[in-house]
Image (cartoon, rainbow, N blue to C red):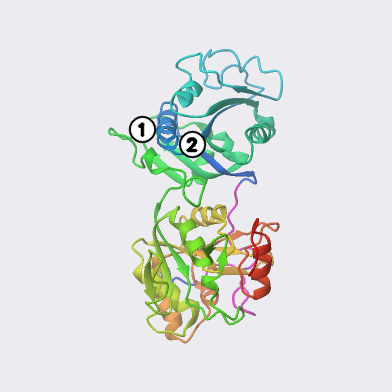
Amino acid sequence: MSRATQPAAPYAPSFRHGFRPGADAPLLAEPAGMRAERMLLIGATSRDAGKTEFASRVLRAAARSREVVGIKVTPVDPEVGGCPRGECGCGLCARLDAPFEIVEEDGRERGKDTVRLLESGARRVFWLRARRPALAQGMAALLDRIGPEALCLCEGNSVRQVVEPGWFVMVRGPACVTEKPSARAALSLADVVTSRTETGFSVSPEEFSPGPSSPWSLRLPATAVVLAGGLSRRMGRDKALLELGGRSLIERVAMTLSDNFAEVLLSVDRADRFPSLPYSKVADAVPGQGPLRGVVSALRAASYPLVFFATCDLENVPVFLVHRLLRAARGHQGAVLLNTDGWPEPLFSVLHRDCLPHLEGGLERGERRLARLFGALRLRYVPVPAQEPLLDLNTPEDYRRACERQPGRVLE
């Protein structure tokens, strides 16, 4: 029996209005850290894995177009004392009396990691030493110091326990080297794992760059699909083409996703839709069968087995939720966002291509609701933060409010 046709997972869903996962459904569980979407965080599985070399190469490439702040974080265990590296070190950590201390690097002591970041092009570099219980407090103070608009690159595994960055990269050293304890906790939280090789890194540092629509861009080997085959009945006109912030809604969504995925497809009802957009289009094989047909057609056409889906009418694409879904999908057939009422958002989800047999079977049986087919798939669920609901624009009133939230925008 294929994975896509396995029987339902052993929890109790509700099908009263579609599909609602039961209370014991598998949820993504991660540390509830402060978000820093303009941060690229780099950790390592072991000492001398090449973390600072990786960071320096990212900086050299990024500094050509943007100012970047470098950050080095050293957590100190009060009960252990001494150098966190297990050596005599410089003695500064042993003399840390306050909960944390932030020092700006001046570049005078050659050979330090912080100086290497400065020499690689960082506009400013800070070193945070913090007693482990005060790490969150120290990071909050540092992020406040550099300002919310600063693009930053940060080194340190333990930071991921208190901060959710825009991207978290783990640099894996040789297999024979013992992994650091902090690495074991951090690996499952990484968005990307790159291995040190004889010729460099399996994921090149130069693949990271400031993106046109995102603070940091890396095109993951996966497909993103923008669903744009709906009839826009409640809006009264084609909502994909509504302008917001100087661009159409569909263009805004597609541009953000193109910063994060190697392939972006537009799922449309007709192949001649949106001729000015530079993305491949996937037309429904059988029109009029709703989003489920669009999802099936896109899964067939995608170049990569892992596919993210989003509708064209989003006010903004919350990239942090996209990354949470991608992490949640590991070892499963996909991951789906749960709204604040506990109902799934089937059109903001990640699905593996091996879901296809089950979804195609649903279409053949006359099913049109994607969510009603979730019960027989091995999925994880990602709750949306209560204070940050997913904002899709379905009505003229939704659009009016979105326009009002745009600085300097006047609705015509």
Q: Quadrant of the C terminus?
A: bottom right
Give the image location of residue 83, x and y in percent.
56, 18
Residue at image coords 59%, 22%: 104
| Residue 44 lies in the magenta stretch | no
Please name whichever residue, 131 or 221, is drawn nearer the observer in this view of the structure.
Answer: 221
Residue at image coords 36%, 31%: 176
Compared with 400, 257 (above or below) is above
Label 2 neighbourhood size at 10 Å, few (<14), some (14-19), many (20+)? many
Give the image location of residue 53, x and y in percent.
40, 29
Residue at image coords 38%, 64%: 279
Please name whichever residue, 400 or 293, is drawn nearer the observer in this view of the structure.
Answer: 400
Give the image location of residue 9, x and y in percent.
53, 68
Label 1 neighbourhood size at 10 Å, few (<14), some (14-19), many (20+)? some
Please name whichever residue, 357 or 198, is drawn nearer the observer in this view of the structure.
Answer: 198
The residue type indicated by label 2 comes to: Ile
Compared with 203, 48 (above or below) is above
Figure quadrant of residue 317: bottom right
> For the residue labelled by badge 2, is the local secondary structure a helix, a strand or a loop?
strand
Figure quadrant of residue 21: bottom right
Instruction: Write down the residue under mark 1.
Output: 174
Question: Residue reaching furthest left?
Answer: 199
Which one is earlier in the sequence, the residue at label 2 or at label 1? 2
> For the residue labelled by badge 1, is the local secondary structure a helix, a strand or a loop?
loop
Instruction: Write down the residue under mark 2.
Output: 42
Asked whether residue 389 appears in the rendered view, the answer is: yes
Residues in magenta, as a range: 9-30
Q: Is residue 131 left or right of residue 332?
A: right
Give the image location of residue 346, x and y in percent.
54, 70
Which secondary structure is most common in the magenta stretch?
A: loop
| Residue 23 lies in the magenta stretch | yes
Asked whether residue 155 appears in the rendered view, the answer is: no
